[in-house]
Image: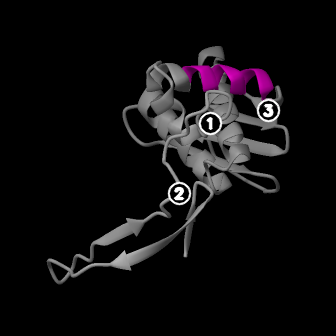
Amino acid sequence: PFRGAGVETRLRRTKPRAPDLEPVSLILPQDISLACNSPERHCRSCATMSNPRSARTARKDQKEKDMKESPEPRIQFVTMDEKMLESAFETAREGYMQKQRGELAHWRDVARKIKEKFDVEFSKAKVWNCVVGKDFGSFVSFNAKNVAYFYIAEMGVLLWKHA
């Protein structure tokens, strides 16, 4: 059985069309609907379907809520400028809240999110590195004014540029 969105389902294999492809159809119990009808209680997956607001507005509202609920960063060591530091805090807080809600499975997913954002925003090449976790040691070489080490709750973040 496969469990998803609180519904137990069964997978039924159908006849493959090509030797390397194997299609799978999903069978849901008949008494389960994918979107809930009650505006008081609805799941995250159907919130945008049952709500007339756009998905972008719903994501923006969730992000604002996360910023209010997430703990303040505790700086250990920082040499980067204010704009980069604020971007690191924002991305790390967002990743922390997604990890707490179960949207991200591992700390490395949070690290990947931070690294990819910094690779796109602050450099042309992929020169940013990020370590995220509860307990880690490090010894790194970095460019001047391009390192940040901080905590958000129990999550430690080490972000640096090396090229």
Q: Is residue 45 magenta?
A: no
Instruction: Give the residue displayed 82% in from the left and 56% down from the top.
Output: 135
Residue drawn at the location 42% of the way across and 43% of the way down: 126
Q: Name the residue nearer the viewer: 102 or 115.
A: 102
Mark 3 Cα shell of 10 Å, populated few (<14), some (14-19), many (≥20):
few
User: Residue 156's mark?
Assistant: none
Residue drawn where x is 60% and y is 16% of the image: 83
Instruction: State the CA–CA distance, disc 2 to disc 1.
Output: 17 Å
| Segment tinted magenta in the rendering | 60-70
- Mark 1 neighbour density, 10 Å: few (under 14) some (14–19) many (20 or more): some
Q: Amino acid at mark 2?
A: Asp
Disc assigned to residue 42: 1
Spot the residue most to the left.
Answer: 18
The residue that mark 2 highlights is 31
Going by the image, does 52 lie left or right of 84?
Answer: left
Q: Which residue corresponds to mark 3?
A: 77
Can residue 162 be seen in this snapshot? Answer: no
Q: Nearer the viewer, residue 8 or 150?
A: 8
- Residue 63 falls inside the magenta stretch: yes
Q: Earlier in the sequence, mark 3 or mark 1?
A: 1
Q: Quadrant of the N terminus?
A: bottom right
Circles 2 and 3: CB atoms closer than 8 Å: no
- Marks 2 and 3 sit apart, C-alpha to C-alpha, by 55 Å
Amino acid, disc 3: Phe
Q: Position of residue 139 (x, y in %)?
A: 72, 53
Which sits earlier in the primary sequence, circle 2 or circle 3? 2
Which percent across, then down, holds residue 113? 54, 42
Please name which of the two marks, 2 or 3, marks the residue nearer to the observer.
2
Give left or right: position of 113 versus 70. left
Considering the numbered disc 2 on the image, is that residue within a helix, a strand or a loop? loop
